[in-house]
């Protein structure tokens, strides 16, 4: 495992919500970070078939373009009754003809697909959020960290916090959706704490333990 010896990195994302969450997580550690969007980097084609492959594509593209380490996240909602969909195509389900993304539409697609499967009971609507972080260096070296959180798809959507599919995902053991949680409640973790709640916070905890701590 390679340690990160700088606190200046690129957040390899053009997703405003994701950039905000990553900055929330790395901020307490003293990082200075600009995003791929800030730097006007071209978004690479995500041609992978796994979260790990797509995370590496994004991180390597930004690391090589910036000449410094880059941290990416590839994440998605995996619904058991839908055979794992939308999965790595989570963002694609939100794409409109004009290239913009409409996550209200995407959440509706998930609900329609579940209804067509007759999945109305909570036990038939199990799902998980997956986050894979990739830390990449300009020389091509990568480190991968995966986090998952189990839960249930609910309908109708609840809450306006977070982003993406958060309003329809209720994490296991909780009575509210990610969309109803503050950022602090959703992540459930800060450096030095033992537990993390969200998929991204769990992946980030592994990143900290592997690449930052002595």
Image (spheres, rainbow, N blue to C red):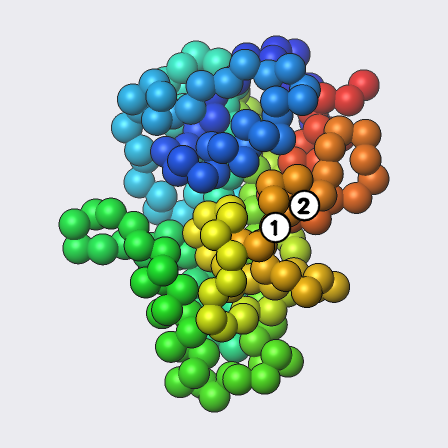
Question: What residue is rendered at 40% in x and 15% in y?
Answer: 66
Q: Disc 1 to disc 2, how far (Cα)? A: 6 Å
Report the quarter where the C terminus lies.
Answer: top right
Vertical placement of residue 80 versus 47, above or below:
below
Q: Give how far across and how far down residue 125 sits, in percent.
A: 56, 76
Indicate left or right for 70 with 151 as reference.
left
Disc 2 is placed on an element classified as helix
Residue 42: image location, x then y, percent: 28, 28
Q: Residue at x 65, y 36 (%)?
A: 204
Residue 64: name its quadrant.
top left
Labelled pair 1, 2 in contact (Cβ < 8 Å): yes
Instruction: Note whether 122 is above or below 138 in the view shown.
Output: below
Q: Which residue is mark 1?
A: 181
Q: Is residue 201 visible?
A: no
| Left or right of 169 on screen, residue 188 | right
Q: Residue at x 37, y 52 (%)?
A: 91
Residue 21 - label: none
Under tag 1, what secondary structure? loop
The residue pinned by badge 2 equals 185
Mark 1: few/some/many CA within 10 Å (<14, 14-19, 20+): some
Circle 2 residues within 10 Å: few <14, some 14–19, many ≥20: few
């Amino acid at each position: 495992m390679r340690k990160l010896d700088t606190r200046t990195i690129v957040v390899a994302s053009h997703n405003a919500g994701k950039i905000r969450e990553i900055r929330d997580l790395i901020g307490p550690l003293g990082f200075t970070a600009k995003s791929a969007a800030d730097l006007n980097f071209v978004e690479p084609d995500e041609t992978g078939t796994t979260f790990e492959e797509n995370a590496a594509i994004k991180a390597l593209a930004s690391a090589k373009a910036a000449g410094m380490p880059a941290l990416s996240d590839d994440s998605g909602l995996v619904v058991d009754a839908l055979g794992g969909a939308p999965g790595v195509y989570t963002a694609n389900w939100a794409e409109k003809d004009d290239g913009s993304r409409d996550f209200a539409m995407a959440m509706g697609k998930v609900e329609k697909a579940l209804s067509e499967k007759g999945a109305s009971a909570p036990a038939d609507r199990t799902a998980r959020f997956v986050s894979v972080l990739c830390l990449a260096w300009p020389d091509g070296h990568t480190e991968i960290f995966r986090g998952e959180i189990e839960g249930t798809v609910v309908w109708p959507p609840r809450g306006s916090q977070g982003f993406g599919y958060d309003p329809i995902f209720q994490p296991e053991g909780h009575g509210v959706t990610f969309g109803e949680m503050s950022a602090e409640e959703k992540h459930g973790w800060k450096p030095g704490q033992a537990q993390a709640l969200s998929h991204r916070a769990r992946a980030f905890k592994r990143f900290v333990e592997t690449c930052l701590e002595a």
